[in-house]
Amino acid sequence: MTIDTHQQGSRDIVTRVKALLSSPKTEWPVIAEEPANVADLYKNYIVILAAIPAIASFIKMSIIGTSVPFVGTFRVGIASGLTTAIVTYVLSLVAIYIIALIIDALAPTFGGVKNQIQALKAAAYSYTAYWVASVFQIVPVLGILILLAGGLYSLYLLYLGLPYTMKAPTDRALPYTAVVVVCAIVISLVLGMVIGTAMGVPQVAGGFSGVGGSSTSSSDVTFDPSSPLGALQQYASKLEDASKNLEQAQSSGDADAQAKAFGNMLGAVLGGATSTGSLAPDQLRGLVPERLGGLQRSNISVERNAALGIQVSQAEATYEGSGRSLDLEITDMGGSAGLMALAGWANFEQDRQTDTGYERTYRANNRIIHEVWDRSSMHGEYSVITSGRFMVTVEGDVPNMDALKAAASGIDLAALDRLGAAQANAR
């Protein structure tokens, strides 16, 4: 990791997180005295850490799934999982700015001094504990408790930070915190309802585009591009560029330019630093074998869907014979590969045993592998994510997991990797 010391006195993100979590009483005075602006606070801190809940949510909902007693493991479809993660992420970026406005507006009421930059510091840095704890939501039961603890600690951070950032008297920091929290809950609920029922994602993106404003300055902290934080920083940079273009298009009044700019913005949210088109249906069809696990293919469907230039391709096939059947699904995230790649960078592993089977998530040969086996029903599922964009799933009733893995070996994963690499090199 390399650090650019453009802003004197600023800390790198890892040091800042550690200091806030371990010694907040000594860190808040440092934060309050640091020079900062809206663009840098978002680019160097908020955009990076706010991605953690969205990534963890996507992993939990669409890759690992949720175990329901007497029902099995429930997973949200990839498309729905992506949509939820994207809306969660972008909404959190908007919400932080709104909470900062609330903190700033309430400052005189509680004996403080209005300052929008200091208010944004208070909002962003107090959220640190919740953002970090949110990674544990992928852990059953215990994760909820850790997430709750993180949320409570974030309230404590806000309470400690208001006297330094907003110059509020210490004896009025507690009611100040309480009012901010109540207002924030109300605003978040209203935003969620409006976005979900009336405005849709475009309005969320539009709200984000105004956050950066016309503030100047460049990134002050850089990370190894191959590291998780480096990947997130590249993702944030793409978002920042796209949001600036959207802001300019909105100012121009040109409807066509606005539509194109929004498409680019959505592409940046979905694809991050790795956005590209998905495979054409005929290419994907060629990767679906005639036979799988000794069974003959009985039907196949292949399609590519696109909206605002974002492409996702999917092939589904069923194999039947001797009273058995297997289902195969190959999904190419294409234009949404960035979020899938972020899930991979999270490097999550799981090993859960039950009375009737197990569920595992692990990495092997630079691929994410997920296995689910229930011996009571003799049903299994084997999924592989490769090249950060392709997800291959084989599911069915088999004698054991080894049989399912043997069937999955009939899919040419190396060919998928080559196609993905060829498209990336052609960009």
Image: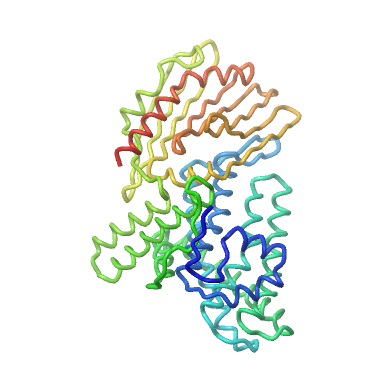
Q: Position of residue 110 (x, y in %)?
A: 65, 87
Q: How are the colours assigned in the image?
A: rainbow
Q: Is residue 194 above or below residue 179?
A: above
Question: Dividing the image into 4 quarters, which one contains the C terminus?
Answer: top left
> Residue at the spot x=49%, y=65% of the render?
42
Q: Position of residue 199 (x, y in %)?
A: 42, 63
Left or right: where does residue 180 sit relative to residue 201? Answer: right
Q: Position of residue 295 (x, y in %)?
A: 48, 13
> Residue at the spot x=42%, y=65% of the render?
218
How many labels were placed on the picture? 0
Q: Residue furthest right?
A: 355
> Residue at the spot x=33%, y=44% of the render?
306
Q: Nearer the viewer, residue 244 or 307?
A: 244
Q: Nearer the viewer, residue 159 or 65?
A: 159
Quadrant of residue 147 in the image?
bottom right
Q: Is residue 362 above or below residue 228?
A: above
Q: Is residue 96 above or below residue 87?
A: below
Q: Position of residue 315 (x, y in %)?
A: 40, 30
Left or right: where does residue 8 sit relative to residue 376? Answer: left
Q: Nearer the viewer, residue 93 or 296?
A: 93
Q: Nearer the viewer, residue 218 or 174?
A: 218
Q: Is residue 102 above or below residue 240?
A: below
Left or right: where does residue 308 sit relative to residue 223? Answer: left
Quadrant of residue 263 in the image?
bottom left
> Residue at the spot x=41%, y=29% of the render?
416
